[in-house]
Image (spheres, grey):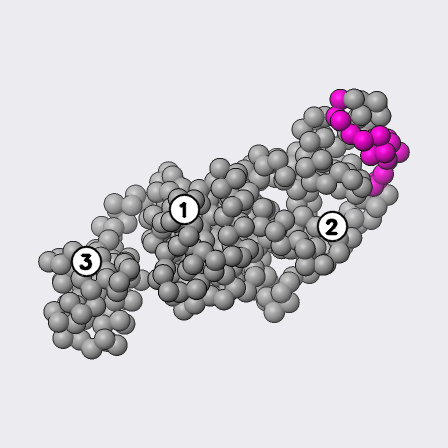
Amino acid sequence: MTIEDVAILYVQGLGVRGVAHLIDHYGSAEAVYSAPMASLIADAGLRKDIAENISLGEGISVARREVEYCRKHGIFMVAATDAEYPALLRETGDRPHILFVKGNIEALSRPMLSMVGTREMSPSGQHITNRLIEGLASTVDSFTLVSGIAYGVDAACHRAAIAHHIPSVAVLANALPEVNPTPHRQLAEDILKNGGALISELTSQSRQNGKHFIARNRIIAGLSMGVVVVESPASGGALSTADLADGYGRAVMAVPGRVTDVSSFGTNNLIRSGKARLVMTAQDIICDMDWERYCIKTITETMQQNESLSLTPDEEMVFEVFKSVAQPDVQQLINATGYTIGELMMILMGLELKGLIRTLPGQRYERI
């Protein structure tokens, strides 16, 4: 990275697409600043005033202050032309030219999966988030989870990743080293301690005006091979991330929910429209992402291992029903075992956490 990589961010009138266009055309920010003004106009198609400003070295002096600011706060700067820059994000036409990174920069070089969702997360959303990440952690070798550190599903994803020792990347809508929302500063510290990273495209001079969230979402979408939407109402930031991922040609996945649950309107619509693939287990994500090559063990081996898990006597009794009934509902399980509804739900949760069964619509269950 050179001082010109930072300076080009401050050229008025360019924007992220303009910067990406110039870098693609000339090969580097240094070459952009070295290009004759006539070439910037005729070959790169810049307006005369923008070309003139680049020729006069606009942004160089403030870039030096930005470099010093980052050095002071322990922030790495990674340009799109650097080897450390995430390969998938580099492919997007609206990529940020500089990523400001705090933490483990190597977390950006692993296969990545983004998980997002509503800020108004339900208990079911919390449960499925934990279950999916636990399943991925036990099966997939060396990957990074990406989310936005917002309230609700995003924060739950980071916490589950920490619990299962998966590095995660939190993409912020504000300049580092600050963390918003402020109650998540401790979560951010935990992400760093777990080998993850905090990243932003915003310089220290960026105004915090609440308008950077959609732009932030494109980074969440662009970093990863795919995006999972856990829960979302009929509109919201998670759906914008799904739209962006779809536009980038990434895998879009969504967790289904009951048709009466507001927090599932968005995910159910994604599935119904064909924009997202339905996922209920970690194995579904692995298949849709074509991640079998990253697996510690094959899906078949994982299932065989699950079947050999030590079950409690209560779990054995309930699991025995699945050998004769393909998709029993709650009443069938009560009739077959004699447990109360409360007892049964606790047993079923244990079987789900062990990866032996999964929930279906209509209070039905099936063996995996």
Q: Are marks 2 and 1 in contact (CB under 8 Å)?
A: no
| Three-letter amino acid code at the position of disc 3 | Gln
Q: For this rendering, which residue is in front, 325 or 135?
A: 325
Counting from the top left corner in percent of width and height, residue 291 is at: 39, 41
Which amino acid is tagged 2? Thr
**Is residue 334 a member of the stretch shown in magenta?**
no
> Residue 334, can we see it?
yes
Q: Nearer the viewer, mark 1 or mark 3?
A: 1
User: Badge 1 is on which residue?
Assistant: 273
The residue singled out by tag 3 in the image is 327
* Left or right, residue 221 beside residue 20: left
Dot 2 surroundings within 10 Å: few (below 14), some, or many (20 or more)? Answer: many
Q: Which numbered disc, 1 or 3, marks the residue that appears first in the sequence? A: 1
Magenta residues (range): 43-60
Is 40 on the left-hand or right-hand side of 308?
right
Q: Horizontal and vertical percent for residue 275? A: 43, 44
- Amino acid type, mark 1: Ser
Q: Quadrant of residue 258?
A: bottom left
Query: Is residue 225 in view?
Result: no
